[in-house]
Image (cartoon, rainbow, N blue to C red):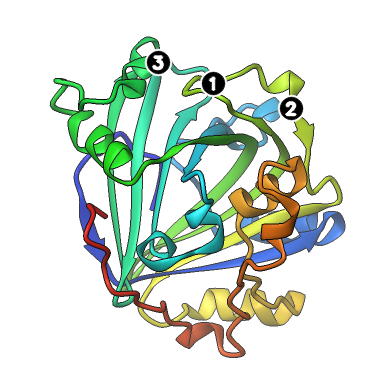
Amino acid sequence: MSPSTDTREYREAACELKFLIDLPTADAVLAWARAHLQPDPHAETSPDQNDGYRITSLYLDTEQFDVFHRRGSFGRSKYRIRRYGGSDLAFLERKLKTKGLLAKRRSTLDLARLQLLHDTTPVADPDAFWFHRRLIARALKPVCQISYQRTARFTLTQLGPIRLTVDHHLHALPAPRLAFSDPAAAQPILPDQRVLELKFRGDIPQLFKQLLLDFALAPSPFSKYRHAARTLGCVPEQTTATATTTPPSPHPATATTTTVLPAPIPA
């Protein structure tokens, strides 16, 4: 549940709750988090970094925007290319949700070699082969780049680690190719809101229950990719109206993941 360099694939019964909160609430939640949780070991501790780190991601979708519309197996898998700070490494990532389990696979590739993923045959690089093969099979292409600052806190419980993140200063711009662009040219999105995420295993921890009560928080099925693609006009307007969303669960502790039958192409 942290941005490590671990490239293994794993499955765990993990739960993730998202919340859209206003700026005063975000400041109060961060003050609460700093009082109750430890700094994320991967976060910077300098005051200008605000005990966080910078994330920039390229989000991929089909020509028909099947991921945006959550059609079939595209509704349970997400492909993105992620960069932390000013690193020269890109993380090739797939997140797959099935039967309430979260599987994540990731590997690294030098930024200078990202253009190899435009080829129509899988690259020979053993770390990138699995990702490139799926991009070809699922006909995925870059749609937009999203960047933001993330503040992260965590602690250990009897059921494992729990993690709280607040994402702020979100910016986005169209991504016509597999390359990271200067975020200075990006358009602000959600300028008056922040994205809070709670990650844990099993039932919601008592500490997070208290947080929800103290701040009267209600989960929201928010997607950074879908919001950015709609805001930037990357998805044709006539198709966005048909996009479906899942209403938030009235019982966050028992939220479940809808399972969709796999498609006959690699997930």
Q: How far apart are marks 3 and 1 (CA)?
A: 8 Å
Residue 185 occupies quadrant: top right
Q: Is residue 218 left or right of residue 62?
A: right
Question: Any mark on residue 180, and which?
Answer: 1
Callout 1, which amino acid?
Phe
In the image shown, does 206 or 26 lie closer to the viewer?
A: 26
As measured in the structure, the alpha-carbon distance from the residue carrying label 2 to the one carrying label 1 is 11 Å
Residue annotated with mark 3:
111
* Image marks 3 and 1: residues in contact by CB distance under 8 Å: yes
Instruction: Indicate the position of residue 247 as horizontal and vertical percent values.
Output: 63, 80
User: Amino acid type of disc 3?
Assistant: Leu
Given residues 20 and 258, the one toward you in this image is: 258
Q: Which residue shows up at 75% across the image and 80% down it?
A: 216
Q: Which percent across, then down, holds residue 8? A: 19, 44
Q: Is residue 98 above or below residue 121?
A: below
Kindly identify the residue that appears in the image at 48 percent across and 28 percent down: 84
- SS at badge 2: loop
Sequence-wise first label, 3 or 1: 3
Tell me the residue that label 2 is attached to: 186
Front in this rendered view, residue 171 or 23? 171
Q: Is residue 78 visible?
A: yes
Q: What residue type is labelled 2?
A: Ala
Q: What element carries label 1?
A: loop
